[in-house]
Amino acid sequence: MPRQNRVTPFGDLIATPDRGTLLGNRGVLHDAGGRIRRAWQVRRWLICVLAFRGRKRQVMTPGRYTELFFLDEATALAAGHRPCAECRRARFTAFRNAREKANPANSAAHRLSATVIDERLHAERLADDRRSKRSFPATLDDLPDGVFVTLAQGREEQAYLVWGDRLLAWSPGGYVERRERPEGAEVRVLTPASTVAAIRAGYIPEVHRSVSALD
């Protein structure tokens, strides 16, 4: 049976046999039996590579951080994670630089630390109940490529990647549907506001190879 450790753009943890391309961390979320007991433990939500310096881990070892997995970086960013400053140092530096470029007044005195970035993201990714995903309204025309939005699909909400003149429907195994990007549409944005600003300032999220199949 697949473990409940795959992350959606909504930040939810689901069980699926589809494999991810990146690793994530929010602290220890599982019990001794490998069951998820909480959505997060620490404010440091990371995006890591799957392999780094030959380190080996047994997934969901009791008392060790819960290994989470993402379809791609755009998904992880939407869920509220940020690049790891160790195993993805170049990506973290690019992410931090874009955030500073987007908010020069807040970073003029010193470089943004990982802790400062984590505190800001923590305030932006969680709703007031501290469990559900926070989103915010925006006009689709104002959003850069690589951001996730949500649209109603009957009684369900579907996450879409903004990509050029299209919206691409997310699934655990890849992007599965292409629809035209409606001009002037009002949407709910899943990607945290400061991350949207960093993307607008030049940070380009990595996306799953299935994007090219929908061209």
Image (cartoon, rainbow, N blue to C red):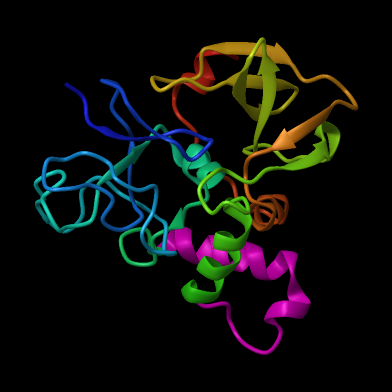
Query: Left or right: where does residue 180 sit relative to residue 46?
Result: right
Q: Main secondary structure of the magenta part?
A: helix
The answer to if 111 sits in the magenta stretch is: yes
Residue pictured at 78% horizontal, 79% vertical: 105
Query: Left or right: where does residue 199 sit relative to residue 14?
Result: right
Q: Is residue 3 above or below residue 74?
A: above
Measured from the top left, where is residue 48 in percent x and y?
33, 52
Query: Left or right: where does residue 75 sit relative to residue 165?
Result: left
Q: How many marks?
A: 0
Measured from the top left, where is residue 34 in percent x and y?
16, 40
Query: What is the magenta range?
Result: 90-113
- Closer to the camera, 129 or 74? 129
Tell which residue pokes out farthest to the front in this image. Answer: 129
Residue pictured at 20% horizontal, 48% vertical: 51
Tell which residue pokes out farthest to the right in this image. Answer: 184
The N terminus sits in image quarter: top left
The C terminus sits in image quarter: top right
- Closer to the camera, 185 or 142? 185
The answer to if 109 sits in the magenta stretch is: yes
Tell me if residue 69 can be seen.
yes
Tell me if residue 206 can be seen.
no
Residue pictured at 47% horizontal, 62% vertical: 92
Q: Is residue 120 above or below residue 77?
A: below
Measured from the top left, where is residue 49 in percent x and y?
30, 49
**Residue 63's quadrant in the figure?**
bottom left
Residue pictured at 71% horizontal, 84% vertical: 108
- Closer to the camera, 150 or 55? 150
Query: Left or right: where does residue 167 sit relative to residue 2?
Result: right
Measured from the top left, where is residue 165 in percent x and y?
75, 22
**Residue 69's quadrant in the figure?**
top left
